[in-house]
Structures are given as structure tokens and as C-alpha cells.
Image: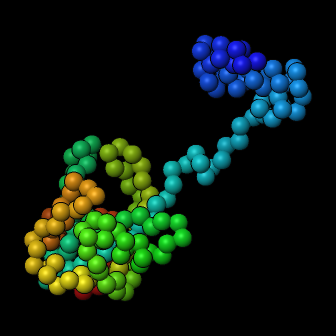
């Protein structure tokens, strides 16, 4: 049976090799072959792109926010986003935010109030994305961090910097964050 499976895999690919295993099992063995030959179920959880929960820290220095700059080559768009990242399974958003700042800047933060939650459905570099962003007011535990103009992000080639968004000329993501922050002021 193994030789036949290898021959099928070489000619038609590994997916058809399992068909060969199923056919041989049905001919020779009954229930095992029916198990292999059954129609594959479409499981929406594994075939659909997932929604990513993230926690972002809104750290202010005067009229500026601490953000990183990124670029979407497909759209030809430069944009900014507050620091933070993915919430792991079983982790609370506040804990994820503290962990992300330690990983990204080796900095401890104090997490303040939840400013809002934004749902962000987007396309980045021609790929669809969907995030639920928990946005928290935050402050550095070390006041010396506010004196730095730039901070190298340790797990990414990007740099965090203070940017003023009041003139409306720069794109700030997630979508809706500019309006959320202007209502907060």
C-alpha cells in the first residue's frame, strides 16, 4: 500500500495520495477507507481570516502622541499608529499593553483609563485585516522617556517618535482614533 501512495503522490500530489489510501482501505478494510474518503468539511473558523484583538497605548507629550511610522507600498501611503500589539489568549488587554511596551521599548508603563474600543477593517499591502483595538491612556513609569525625541523599537525595524496630528495632514490608525481623541480633549 505504501508504494501505491508514493506513486500517487508523485503523479497527482499528496492530496490525491490520501485518496489512494482511502480507496485501498475501502477495498481491503471498510470503515477506515470511508473515514479517509469522506467529504472534507468547511470549517469557517480555520478557512476565514481571523479577527485580531490588540491593545494600544495613547501616550501624550504636550500636543504630540508617541507613534511609529509605517508605509504601505501598495497604497503608497505613509501612516502612524500608537504602540502596542496583539492580545494573547487568556491575557487581559491591560496586561498585553504592558507586555508589548516591555518588548518594544524595554519600558514600563502605567495603564490608565480605557479611552475606547475601535473596530478596524482594513487592507494592508493588498491583504485584508480586521482588528478590535482597545485604546488606553498610558504614561511612562520613567519620566526620562518623555525627553527622548525617538525610541528604537526593539522587535521591529521601526522607530517610535512624538508626532503632532492637530493639522490633519498625517494619517493616524486605527481609523476613528483621531475623532476619538479630539472628543477626549
x 34%, y 50%: residue = 124
Residue 149 visible in the shown view: yes
- What is the x, y in percent for residue 164? 14, 73
- What is the x, y in percent for residue 126? 35, 43
Location of residue 81 with respect to 3 vertically, above or below: below
Q: How many labels does the image show?
A: 0
x 72%, y 19%: residue = 2
x 24%, y 81%: residue = 140
Q: In this view, does 2 lie to the left or right of 51?
A: right
- For the residue pair 89 and 113, the one nearer the viewer reads as 89
By what rule are the colours in the image chosen?
A: rainbow
- What is the x, y in percent for residue 52? 46, 60
Location of residue 74 with respect to 179 vertically, above or below: above
Q: Is residue 41 left or right of residue 78?
A: right
Residue 81 appears in which quarter of the rendering?
bottom left
- What is the x, y in percent for residue 128? 42, 49
x 67%, y 22%: residue = 16
Quadrant assignment for the C terminus = bottom left
Location of residue 171 with respect to 166 vertically, above or below: above
Quadrant assignment for the N terminus = top right
Residue 112 appears in which quarter of the rendering?
bottom left
Amino acid at each position: 500500500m505504501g508504494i501505491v501512495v508514493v506513486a500517487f503522490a508523485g503523479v497527482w500530489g499528496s492530496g490525491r495520495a490520501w485518496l489512494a489510501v482511502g480507496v485501498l482501505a475501502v477495498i481491503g478494510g471498510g470503515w477506515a477507507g470511508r473515514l479517509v474518503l469522506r467529504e472534507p468539511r468547511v470549517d469557517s473558523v480555520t478557512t476565514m481570516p481571523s479577527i485580531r484583538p490588540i491593545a494600544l497605548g495613547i501616550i501624550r507629550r504636550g500636543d504630540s502622541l508617541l507613534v511609529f511610522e509605517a508605509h504601505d507600498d501598495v497604497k503608497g501611503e505613509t501612516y502612524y499608529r500608537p504602540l502596542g500589539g496583539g492580545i494573547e489568549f487568556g491575557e487581559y488587554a491591560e496586561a498585553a499593553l504592558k507586555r508589548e511596551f516591555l518588548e518594544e521599548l524595554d519600558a514600563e508603563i502605567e495603564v490608565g483609563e480605557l479611552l475606547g474600543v475601535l473596530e478596524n477593517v482594513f487592507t494592508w499591502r493588498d491583504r485584508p485585516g480586521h482588528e478590535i483595538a482597545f485604546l488606553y491612556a498610558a504614561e511612562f513609569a520613567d519620566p526620562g522617556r518623555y525627553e527622548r525625541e525617538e525610541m528604537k523599537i526593539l522587535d521591529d525595524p521601526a522607530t517610535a517618535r512624538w508626532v503632532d496630528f492637530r493639522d490633519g495632514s498625517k494619517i493616524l490608525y486605527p481609523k476613528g482614533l483621531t475623532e476619538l481623541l479630539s472628543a477626549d480633549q
